[in-house]
Image (cartoon, rainbow, N blue to C red):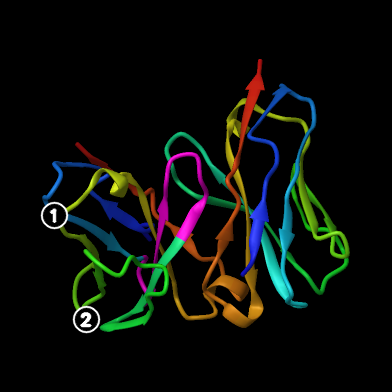
Amino acid sequence: NAGVMQNPRHLVRRRGQEARLRCSPMKGHSHVYWYRQLPEEGLKFMVYLQKENIIDESGMPKERFSAEFPKEGPSILRIQQVVRGDSAAYFCASSPNRQGWGNTEAFFGQGTRLTVV
Amino acid sequence: AQTVTQSQPEMSVQEAETVTLSCTYDTSESDYYLFWYKQPPSRQMILVIRQEAYKQQNATENRFSVNFQKAAKSFSLKISDSQLGDAAMYFCAYRARSNDYKLSFGAGTTVTVRA
């Protein structure tokens, strides 16, 4: 059973370009969470998705950021017109159900390190 | 809003010795979970240990144990018999049972293990 797979591991974008980060949850997991880790900081919650639904996007910047988790395929975190401040590590985690955090272990991917030059 | 504070940016320990990492948190909730995550250079976030606030007994996982002081809102991690593979960034995290999915993380403590 493969873990949470994120790709790419490293992504370099020029200012103004678009960044697309992919997350394939563990088999059987239909709940996905995205977190951002800025340099020298802990992870910050961005968005929680279930298949085809955004449940909570309270941690997402209002502009330029969007996330989706289609019926088929990975979850995508999309950042349009990237700026230097978007440089960070972006982590995805998945769980089999909403209560996954409490009663069952949620699993993180290895993250995507985005560098904006 | 919940905040998690790790006051030690870096800690160093001799191999086979013990190191204790500090964590304090602020919450108005009475029921919640606390976690310690390990992030090695690979960046993989690995759950080390979990504590449920309603349980008075401190959690233990092999060489890792916690000292949970609910009244003081303190949650320290002790690593015994430190090994070179323990070298990593360690994050303390909090989740309120009322908001199951959202974790709040501290800024992390970098642990270096000296051979």
**Secondary structure beneath disc 2?**
loop
Q: Is residue A27 magenta?
A: yes
User: Can residue A32 be seen in the rendering of this structure?
Assistant: no
Q: Is residue B60 magenta?
A: no
The residue that label 2 is drawn on is A71
- Residue B60 or A88: which is nearer the viewer? A88
Image check: A39 left or right of A17? right
- Measured as percent of width and height from the top left, residue A17 is found at 11, 50
Kind of residue at disc 2: Lys
Kind of residue at disc 1: Glu
Q: Residue at x 66, y 18 (%)?
A: B114
**Secondary structure beneath disc 1?**
loop
- Measured as percent of width and height from the top left, residue A86 is found at 29, 49
Q: Which residues are magenta?
A: A26-44
Image check: A19 left or right of A41? left
- Measured as percent of width and height from the top left, residue B57 is found at 87, 63
Whether A59 is drawn above or below A80: the answer is: below
- Residue A25 or A55: which is nearer the viewer? A55
Q: Residue A95: name its quadrant.
A: bottom left
Image check: A99 left or right of A63? right
Q: Residue B28: name its quadrant.
A: bottom right
- Residue B36 or B61: which is nearer the viewer? B36
Q: CA distance from mark 2 to mark 1?
A: 23 Å
